[in-house]
Amino acid sequence: MGFATIDIEREKRCGFPEVIFCQGKTPADTAGIAKEILKHHKYLMATRADEKTYRSVKRVIRDAVYHQKARIITVDRRAKPGCVMKQGLIVVITGGTSDIPVAEEARITAEMMGNRVETLYDVGVAGIHRILDHSQLIRKANVIIVVAGMEGALASVVGGLVDKPVIGVPTSVGYGAHFQGLAPLLTMLNSCAAGVAVVNIDNGFGAGYMASLINK
C-alpha cells in the first residue's frame, strides 16, 4: 500500500487475520489498512483505537463497531459472528475497576477468536473473600486471565487456587513506586504459583490471543 504491507496469509498460518495496532498510525492510514484487510477476510480487529480513528474507519466501513473501554474496533461479517466454541471457557479477572479497560481488551480479543468468555471484575487481594466467593466459576475455566495493577499479587492468588493455566497481565495502574506497571510485572514474574505465565504491561490483546490458543 506504499505505507503498509498487509499480511493477507496471516489467518492461514496463525488462525486469525492480521490485527491493526492503531497507536502511532494516522486515522486515515488505519482506515486504509482496515479496508484492505476486509478485501481478503470477513472479520477484522484493530486495537488501541481512539474515537477519531474509529470515525475515520466508520466512514469507509459502515458496519465497524467501537468498543470504547477496550479501545478496539471490530468488524464481523461471518455467517455466525464469533463462531463460539461449545467447549472451553476463558475467565477474565481484574484486581480493581481501574484494570477493566485492559481486561476488556482481552475479553473482546478472545471473543473475536471464537471463545466463550466470562468476566469477574474488582475482586482484588484487598478483599480476598471476593475471589474466594467465585471459586466454582474460576475452576470451570480452561484458561484464566488475571489483570492487576498496584502490586499485582492477584495472579499468584488465583494460580494457587486452580489447576489451569493463568495468564497474568500487569497494568500501569498504581502510585509512584509502582513504576507504570513494572512493580506488578516483577511480582507476577516472580510468582511462586507454578501455573502463572505473564504478558507485557497493559497487553490485554496478547493475553486474550494466548488464552484462545490454549483453549483451542
Image: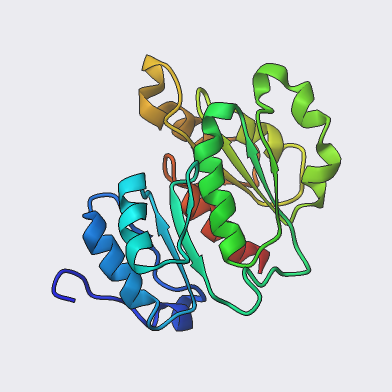
Residue found at x 50% / y 28%: 149
Q: Looking at this view, is 17 or 142 the one in front? A: 17
Can I make out residue 25 in this image? yes
Left or right of 141 on screen, residue 38:
left
Vertical comparison of 70 with 17: above or below: above
Residue 197: % across, % down: 55, 47
Q: Looking at this view, is 106 or 29 the one in front? A: 29
| The C terminus - image quarter | bottom right
Quarter occupied by residue 34: bottom left
Q: Residue furthest left?
A: 2
Residue 111: % across, % down: 61, 60
Residue 188: % across, % down: 53, 35
The number of numbered badges drawn on the structure is: 0
Q: Looking at this view, is 39 or 100 the one in front? A: 39
Q: Looking at this view, is 178 or 72 the one in front? A: 72
Residue 91: % across, % down: 69, 48
Residue found at x 66% / y 17%: 126
| The N terminus - image quarter | bottom left
Vertical comparison of 167 with 176: above or below: below
Can I make out residue 192 in this image? no
**Image color mode:** rainbow
Residue found at x 73% / y 37%: 160
Vertical comparison of 146 with 207: above or below: above
